[in-house]
Image: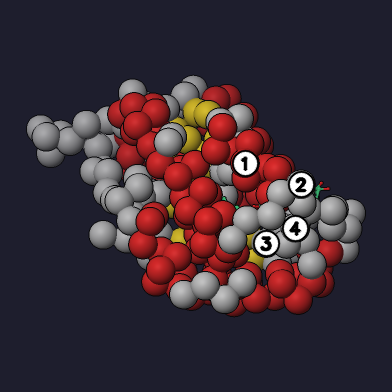
Amino acid sequence: NGHSSESRGALIVLEGLDRSGKSSQSSRLVSYLEGLGFPAELWRFPDRNTSVGQMISSYLSNKSQLDDHTIHLLFSSNRWEKRSLMETKLKSGTTLVVDRYSYSGVAFSSAKGLDFDWCKAPEKGLPAPDLVLFLDISPEKAAERGGYGDERYEQHDFQRKVSQQYKALEDASWKVIDADQAIDEVEKQLREVVLKCVKICKNGKSMSQLWL
Ligand code: Z5A
Ligand code: MG
């Protein structure tokens, strides 16, 4: 009815295994939205620019060792430290296209063997995505793309476990896209759902909190 509802930007998250195409597609989506006149920004987690992000970066590149629980909580606090800015941007009408979010947090840590619900707990109450675009690809196909680098987690059997944990997180906000298609075809399919979502949020869909 337009009385209490307020126009805002959409929180759109891209998830998927390594090399599934998240970073490529995130930046294409931002250009697409900007081209249509919708304010949009590209975000990514981990945000390696903060001091917490630098600890995470050092861990990922094997320059430091951390207990599995500790690194899990650092990834989570890296999202919490960006929460108020995320909310401010969304309320001001900017759509955020986010390369990885809490789903990566839970999928990677639980794939190591940490308790699934324990992994979800610190994420509860973060801004809930309006749309999660899951770029679906097998670990084998993903590995064919330029090969994995030297970072922790970039190994075959581990990626398979991550894939299983992702499946356990799927809910109604997810749109699963076959990521083993040509890059332009994936983009085309993403554009369609993203535009729909941005329009719904602009028309005042209320914001909600993750996993509460
Ligand atoms: N992690 C965690 O444990 N907990 C958390 O809370 C969070 C993250 C947030 C770093 O993340 C690690 O942190 C990550 C999860 C963990 N672990 N690992 N490994 P990251 O975001 O820095 O991860 P990444 O290594 O940057 O992901 P990625 O390898 O960059 O994948 P991507 O972004 O999905 O793919 P891409 O860069 O867009 O594309 C990869 C290549 O494939 C590239 O050469 C493209 O040109 C090519 N490509 C893309 N699409 C296609 C198609 N459709 N066809 C053919 N080729 C393609
Ligand atoms: Mg990436």
**Circle 1 is placed at which residue position?**
55
Q: Residues within 10 Å of mark 4 (few under 14, many from 20)?
A: few
Of 146 and 178, which appears nearest the observer? 146
- Disc 4 vs disc 1: which is toward the camera? 1
Location of mark 3 (residue): 17
* Structural distance between the alpha carbons of marks 2 and 3: 23 Å
The residue that appears at 45% across and 45% down in the rendered structure is 77
First in sequence: mark 2 vs mark 3: 3
The secondary structure type at the circle numbered 1 is helix
Disc nearest the viewer among 1 and 3: 1
Position of residue 174 relative to residue 52, above or below, is below
Q: Residue at x 77, y 51 (%)?
A: 62
Say whether disc 4 or disc 1 marks the residue closer to the N-terminus.
1
| CA gap, disc 1 and disc 3 | 22 Å
Where is residue 3 drawn, in percent x and y? 10, 32
Q: Amino acid at mark 2?
A: Lys
Q: For residue 65, say whether it is visible.
A: yes
The label shown at residue 152 is 4
